[in-house]
Image (spheres, helix red, strand yellow):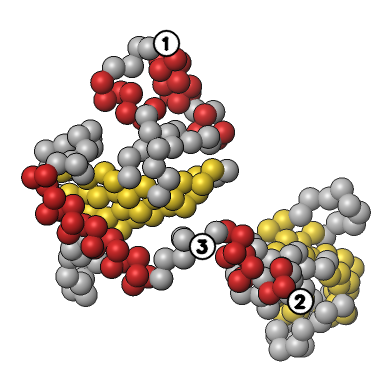
Amino acid sequence: FLGEQAGAPREYVYASRDRHDESYDMVRAVRDARFKYIRHYNPGEPYLIWVPYLNKHPIMQEMWRLYMEGELKGPQTLLFGPKPVEELYDTHNDPYEIENLAGDAEHRGELDRLRKALDDWIEHVGDMSRMSEFEMVRLWYPDGKKPRTAPPLFVPICEENPGRVAAPEGGSYRGPLLVQIHCATQGASVAYTLNEGEDTRWLLYAGAIRLPEGETTIRARAIRIGYAESEEKTAKFSVEKAIS
């Protein structure tokens, strides 16, 4: 979007949300340089759905206090009211989006234009929001079973084996020795520890591990969001002193 290869400016910008933490709130929106159109799929519900994290914020707590005591006036109360089916705002003349023009006959042309732009975009991207999360998960997981993250694999890197062959159970090598941890599941995160026992600190794998001389046990496991965690893998490496 910058420099010599920048494309032409877009006519529209789109936005969407389907849930806010614990609560569902399906909303779609589109805007051009001046007008913004918002479509609510749960009209009649309050703007302020239950979001515990949001309610921890001091400003939100103060807003609730003022609302309960009747101290909010005019536009200040909009946040506590019900959502309409549609909203339309002239962001040039109303940058804070206070006056909803969706029911204004003079702006019917803008409303229809942005409605169509949003409908076309929903069709173009294959928006799956009309499908429930339960149904969507059934598509992701055949027979309702989560796929399991592939187990980690240990790859020694040293003079005699510069990463050519994996060593699932470890082995003896002459130092210096680095060990990479590989997971075949795309997008998985790997955690490892060099300690024994259950009450130990696990580290996020971010690069090859340099092992000291002597014996070291590496334990590792992998997880990808939406997948079941891999089985834990253990490898024992023995590092001999490098020949001078």
Q: CA distance from mark 3 to mark 2?
A: 38 Å
Residue at left 74%, top 65%?
228
Label 2 element class:
strand
21 and 219: which one is in front? 21
187 is higher (above) or lower (below) than 44? below
17 and 5: which one is in front? 17
**Tag 2 residue:** 153
Label 1 element class:
loop
Across the whole image, how many numbered discs are drawn on residues?
3
Residue at left 34%, top 70%?
123
- Quarter of the C terminus within the rendering: bottom right
Q: Position of residue 193 (x, y in %)?
A: 79, 59
87 is higher (above) or lower (below) than 202? above
State the mark number for residue 131: 3
5 and 147: which one is in front? 147
Label 3 element class:
loop
How packed is label 1: few (under 14 Cα within 10 Å), some, or many (20 or more)? Answer: few
Q: Position of residue 20 (x, y in %)?
A: 50, 45
Residue type (three-letter) at the residue carrying disc 1: Glu
Label 1 with label 2: CB-CB less than 8 Å? no
Quarter holding residue 153: bottom right
* Direction left: furthest residue: 106
- Quarter of the N terminus within the rendering: bottom left
**Tag 1 residue:** 69
Residue type (three-letter) at the residue carrying disc 2: Leu
How packed is label 3: few (under 14 Cα within 10 Å), some, or many (20 or more)? Answer: few
Residue at left 91%, top 54%?
197
Sequence-wise, which precedes: disc 1 or disc 2? 1
Residue at left 11%, top 38%?
93
